[in-house]
Image (cartoon, helix red, strand yellow):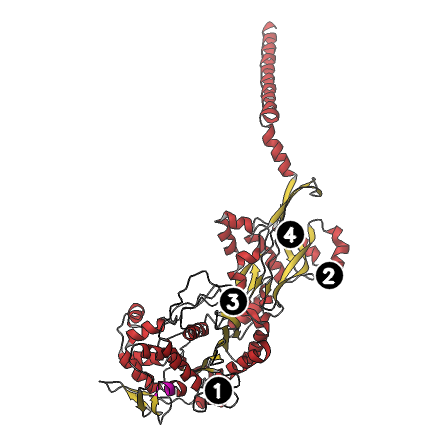
């Protein structure tokens, strides 16, 4: 009996000790949580009841040189879903219910889930953008049924003259997964894009993204357990983007768009004095508004598979053989190297035989031009004169002189992408083809054929260098924005050589020149140089324009300026597969220059 009692007392004491130890541990834990870690959990409790909401900056506007709006922000309303702590099944259920009262397409649904997977730091994601008035009113009346869905004011980027300026202005688009990866490696950049959904992707919108974008702000708010707003704690205002005033003239854009509408090609017009671009047009074109909120698969496929390549910027990102438009620049090379002078002439029988070979090069004029000097050679575009000049000059001297006019180099225009083109030389060929230079390649280069490639932007930039007889700042799309790069006023060649070449270009539009069709109505005193560039090698066969596929026809080119006695504007026009420069590109250039002096100037 005593033994049993002893066992019970012992068990009771053990149980009491365990209970005492448990109470002691609870007391220590409470002390740890309430006293020692008080500040830590106080901050956590605050954060649980506080939210940081982004305040988007308003993107800067883009104007032409006369304050016409080219890119603006339009107030719209978006339907957004709070995705926090929601599974895909939950979100599909919400979208399903919304579909009963709103029209929600598969594209909108796909874009929603794509953004959810790519933008993991977002709490709210737009489902339906730019809701129309009818749907807006109807949703507002049913809003109480959707506690996780909000109607949000948003400014939508809009391009009111989209097609006329598509390649120039570019467009913005939703921030992609690749963009987010770039932000994550740059904390400052990530901070700048906090809460933003779009970024400049092409053209001016991309080049000037940093200034157009602005900087996000934020507001810190306190919410209750139901996530309802209680009070605002902090507010840091967003910094709106800066507006841009371009050098472009909207009326010139409209005119150039009209002139190119039936062609594949491009046009660029500049102010000769400062290299500012007045008109910049590439055709075919596209509507940049399609991209603002994510282009549909159907529209993208249509643009991407179009054989005419409407997305291609043919002003700076397409390069072509410059053809005979190179002859004024080659003339400078001959004059400054004393290979020719104003009085030097040759007899052109219609062909040229490369010395010490049997290789024959034909002139475009089968019967030849007869006796020609530098002036008539430019005016009539005599191939044989320039074959002879190139042979006696040599490729090294040609290369040195042509490089002064920026051939084979970028113009530095303020756009995100620009092709360099090719100024062929023995060094270039050895590097890219592992082969030695041949003399006949020098002959091809003299008429802008062979491997010689340049863009319309390079042609007009080179022309401005020639007309000013000095290095010019990069081509600029911004009004009154001169380059920060210091340039020398030193002349690139003797002024008398420039005047000789200008006289030759003036004669191009005379009664004996290749653009003689305007000789009697050249009231704005246009001078220039026509060009016709072969697309494929003819070898021994004759070129028959009437019986050749359109895509194999020659390119039509023209570079020019006006007035010839006081140069103010310059232009370069290239029409793909357009035929002779004098019949397609040159008339377009004349119409543009006439429009400028009659309407703009």
- Residue picked out by circle 4: 91
Q: Which residue is mark 3?
A: 477
Residue 404 visible to the viewer: yes
Residue 506 at what x, y percent from top left? 44, 84
Q: Indicate which disc residue 135 carries.
A: 2
Gap between marks 2 and 4 measured at Cα: 20 Å
C-beta proximity under 8 Å, tags 1 and 3: no
Which residue is tagged 1? 583
Q: Residues within 10 Å of mark 2 (few under 14, many from 20)?
A: few
Residue 305 highlighted magenta (yes or no):
no
Residue at the extreme left of the image, as rendered: 356
Place of residue 283 in the rendered image (x, y in percent of width and height, measured from the top left): 53, 75
Q: Is residue 241 above or below residue 327?
A: above
Inter-mark Cα distance, 3 to 2: 41 Å
Q: Are marks 1 and 2 in contact (CB under 8 Å)?
A: no
The nearer-to-camera label among 4 and 1 is 1
- Whole-angstrom CA distance, mark 1 to mark 3, is 30 Å
* Magenta span of residues: 373-377
The numbered mark, 3 or 2, whose residue comes first in the sequence reads 2
Q: Nearer the viewer, residue 163 or 307?
A: 163
């Amino acid at each position: 009996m005593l033994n049993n009692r002893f066992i019970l007392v012992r068990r009771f004491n053990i149980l009491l000790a365990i209970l005492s130890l448990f109470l002691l541990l609870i007391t220590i834990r409470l002390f740890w949580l309430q006293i020692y870690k008080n500040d830590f959990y106080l901050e956590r409790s605050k954060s649980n009841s506080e939210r940081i909401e982004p305040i988007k900056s308003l993107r800067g506007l883009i104007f032409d040189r006369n304050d016409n709006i080219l890119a603006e922000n339009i107030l719209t309303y978006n339907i957004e879903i709070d995705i926090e702590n929601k599974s895909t099944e939950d979100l599909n259920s919400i979208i399903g219910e919304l579909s009963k009262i709103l029209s929600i397409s598969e594209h909108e649904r796909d874009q929603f889930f794509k953004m959810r997977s790519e933008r993991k730091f977002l709490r709210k994601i737009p489902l339906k953008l730019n809701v129309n008035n009818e749907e807006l009113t109807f949703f507002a009346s049913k809003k109480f049924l959707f506690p996780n869905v909000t109607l949000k004011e948003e400014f939508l980027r809009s391009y009111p003259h989209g097609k006329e300026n598509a390649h120039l202005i570019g467009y913005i688009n939703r921030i992609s997964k690749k963009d987010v990866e770039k932000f994550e490696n740059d904390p400052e950049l990530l901070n700048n894009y906090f809460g933003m959904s779009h970024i400049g992707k092409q053209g001016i919108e991309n080049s000037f993204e940093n200034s157009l974008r602005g900087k996000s702000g934020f507001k810190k708010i306190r919410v209750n357990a139901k996530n309802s707003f209680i009070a605002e704690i902090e507010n840091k205002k967003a910094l709106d983007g800066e507006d841009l005033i371009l050098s472009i003239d909207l009326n010139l854009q409209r005119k150039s768009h009209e002139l190119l509408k039936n062609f594949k090609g491009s046009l660029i017009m500049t102010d000769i004095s400062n290299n500012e671009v007045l008109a910049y047009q590439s055709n075919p074109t596209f509507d940049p508004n399609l991209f603002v909120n994510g282009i549909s698969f159907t529209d993208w496929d249509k643009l991407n598979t179009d054989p005419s390549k409407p997305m291609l910027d043919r002003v700076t990102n397409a390069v072509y053989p410059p053809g005979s438009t190179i002859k004024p620049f080659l003339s400078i090379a001959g004059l400054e190297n004393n290979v020719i002078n104003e009085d030097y002439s040759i007899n052109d029988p219609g062909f040229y035989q490369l010395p010490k070979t049997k290789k024959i090069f034909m002139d475009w004029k089968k019967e030849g031009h007869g006796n020609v000097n530098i002036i008539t050679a430019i005016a009539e575009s005599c191939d044989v004169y320039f074959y002879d000049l190139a042979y006696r000059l040599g490729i090294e001297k040609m290369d040195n002189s042509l490089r002064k006019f920026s051939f084979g180099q970028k113009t530095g225009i303020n756009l995100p992408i620009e092709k360099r083109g090719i100024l062929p030389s023995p060094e270039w060929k050895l590097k890219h083809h592992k082969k030695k230079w041949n003399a006949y390649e020098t002959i091809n280069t003299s008429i802008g054929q062979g491997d010689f490639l340049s863009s319309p932007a390079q042609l007009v930039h080179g022309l401005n260098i020639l007309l000013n007889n000095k290095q010019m700042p990069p081509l600029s799309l911004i009004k009154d924005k001169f380059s920060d790069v210091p340039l020398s006023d030193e002349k690139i060649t003797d002024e008398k050589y420039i005047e000789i070449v200008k006289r030759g270009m003036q004669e191009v539009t005379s009664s004996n020149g290749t653009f003689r069709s305007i000789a009697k109505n050249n009231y704005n005193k246009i001078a220039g140089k026509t060009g016709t560039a072969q697309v494929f090698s003819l070898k021994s066969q004759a070129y028959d324009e009437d019986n050749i596929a359109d895509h194999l026809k020659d390119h039509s080119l023209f570079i020019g300026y006006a007035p010839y006695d006081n140069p103010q504007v310059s232009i370069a026009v290239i029409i793909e597969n357009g035929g002779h420069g004098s019949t397609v590109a040159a008339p377009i250039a004349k119409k543009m220059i006439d429009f400028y002096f009659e309407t703009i100037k």
